[in-house]
Amino acid sequence: MLKPGMILCDRYEILEVVGAGGMSIVYKAKCHRLNRNVAIKVLKPEFSNDRNFVTKFRIEAQASAGLTHPNIVNVFDVYDDEEINFIVMELVEGITLKEFIAQNGRLPMDRAIDFAIQIASGLEAAHENHIIHRDIKPQNIIVSRNGNLKVTDFGIAKAATSTTLTSGAMGSVHYISPEQARGGYSDERSDIYSLGITMYEMVTGRVPFEGDNNVSVALMHIQSEIIPPRQYYPDIYSSFEKVIMKATQKKPERRYLTASALIADLKRVQNNPNIDIVVAPTAITNSPTQEWTKEDVQAIKDASAYRDPYENSQLNAFAINNPIQNNMGEMHPVGGVSTIPVNNSRLNQLMEDTWDEDEYEDDYEEQPARGRSGIKKVQDDYEEPDYEDDEEMDPGLKKAVMIGGIAAAVILAIILMVVLGNVLGWFKGGDKKKETTTTEVGGVQDLVMKDVLEYSEAAAVKLLEDEGFTNVKVVQENNQDVQAGYVFEQSVEPNTVVPSDTEIVLKVSAGAELKAVPSVADLSDEQATTMLEEAGFKVRHAYEFSEDVEKDYVISQTPEGNADAPEGSEVIITVSNGSEKKEVSVPNLFNLTEEQAKTSLTEVKLNPGTIGREFSDTVQEGRVISQSIPSGTKATEGDTIDFVVSKGPEEKIVTYTANISGSVTCNDSSLDGQAVTVQIRLDGVTVSEQTITVVAGTPNSVSGTKSGLEFNTGYSADIVIIDAGGNNITASFSCSTSVSYTEVTESSGE
């Protein structure tokens, strides 16, 4: 594994691992030459020395590099750097369509149609270049953050020619076309089938076929009919349903022949949902059922025990495929499977023809099959033989022909014996039960009842009528466990011998009983879930961000409240994740202009709040002095940040205060004991007065101040003394004064 920081080809710096497959690891890397991020798919070291694997790895790039389209992940280049083999691809930020459906539930019609058009457009470009993808599925489609879709992993595509045959069922089993499952001819219409299944999942939230194992699911694609999407959700456009049903026809010639034709119909539906789309009728082939013997099953087990030397796991049930015939509800390989010789060299050759990374394996979570599957259980490890050449008959086919000939001879001999025995009366004695099955009384024949449980209504009635039963009745009854249209009960037990005119009542499922779906919008998730489950419905959750609905409360539901839906069916409730606001780091606004500060906040989805203004001797006028939340602090998108802008230095007013101090001494003893007023004057203006009691010969200190002076010099101070009668008696005193000044600075107040 490559380490972050490693440089490939002096150009690509490895950043991190973003995914891994069976043979490769995908890294996010930076291209220093073009200054962009790319995805790099690197072949795992254990395969780098295998020339065949390296060749297949390069084929992937060669098949994809020529495809340039907005709906296809672009391949830029392929390199071999010191035995590190890697492909450089476009890096798409987003999630797979599979994850998108899991997160959001089934898609609204408009979005599903838009997505389908985008996928089909990518396929159209590939098909025009004679490239078949052969593994279309939601896991191989990326939904980017802006809603654009890109098809990726053309790793198993190969140039389409008139003789292109799949050497194995390459696609994931839930999306595989019938012809791929058979191992037959694969062309552009195989991709259209897989896209049809993908569209089905987009509008229903599920795949059409589910089973206990991959074999059973693949066989359903070959012979079982798809349940129309509107049986699950009536709100699906009828026209869109017809597009899906046409794309998923069993026979390729009944599907859309080109992606362009599919796109044309999708756009017609997009413009007018009420438009009619023509779908060819489904052809059903009826022929006798062939059963596998115990020896056949054991041979299959023995053959499938071969282990893949590269993946160290049992070969997938469809790693080696023969064509499969559809015979009245049972699937069996052409030519039989009574013996399957294991040829390791041939298997290795097939492995060379089939490059099947883990990323192409089916990763859909298996669920129990719903209702009638239309097939019987097949061994999980079933593996079919492959044909070397059209002119050379497969050993299994030779044996089947031989067995068929022997069986025909035995059957002919039995028929002759029965006819001859009836003529000669050989069977008149013996087992009475056998006698009743061959005896007719008044045109009524005794017959052995067949097991028709889980058959479709039409198939069950036809089977019994073909057997000779003349009184078959069908009763429709609601049943939430069995798919609508299939038998879940029969009045006569299987293998019971009854007259051919016996009334046989088949109970056929009418589907689950319809019930009104409770309306749960605006309820809490817990309340909604409880209410729906108590009403008999299953609940599936989808989640969305909402600015209007509180977190953990229901935004919407499908089906809508009070609509009728089958009891036990699924109701999808979309629950609010709350506001889609994220935490962001508060930017540093200091010394920014007011407009710069506002822009800086809005870029991280924060709102400028109150803008204050203050004088500052250190910050230039118009620049931010401070902010309400410090920079680097975490805030939530939409929060408000206040800040203060400088008004520049404040204008100052300077004044002076005169501080006058002095001393007075009385020289007239006749004034002893009298109270006199001492006035301190500045430039003749009294600034202070104080009363003293005269004691002749004793000095008294006096002081006063005068503020608001414009200058700090040029002022004269003197002292005046007034007696109680208002007379100026300053001459009777000795006086002295001194003046000092204090500077006073004040704001201008502006």
Image (cartoon, rainbow, N blue to C red):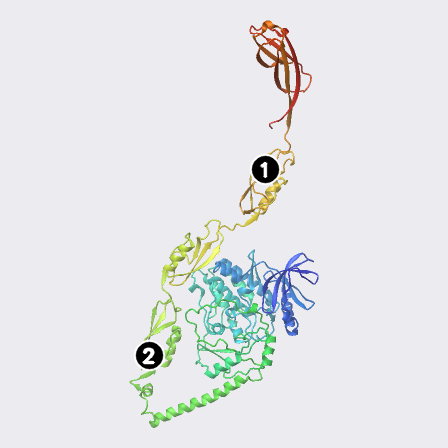
| Mark 1 nearby-residue class (10 Å; few <14, some 14–19, many ≥20) | many
CA separation in Å, label 1 and label 2: 96 Å
In percent of width and height, residue 129 lies at 62, 67
Q: Image height check: is 683 above or below 64?
A: above
Kind of residue at badge 2: Thr
Amino acid type for the residue under numbered disc 1: Val
Secondary structure beneath dot 1 equals strand
Which element carries disc 2, helix, strand or loop? Answer: loop
How many numbered marks appear? 2
> Residue 487: horizontal and vertical position, in percent?
37, 72
> Of all residues shown, which one is farthest toward the right?
10
Considering only vertical position in the picture, is 705 above or below 269? Answer: above
The quadrant the C terminus occupies is: top right
* Residue 644: assigned label: 1
Residue drawn at x 64%, y 19% is 658
**Label 2, residues with CA under 10 Å away: few <14, some 14-19, many ≥20:** some
Q: Residue 470 carries which label?
A: 2
Residue 270 lies, in percent from the top left, at 50, 59
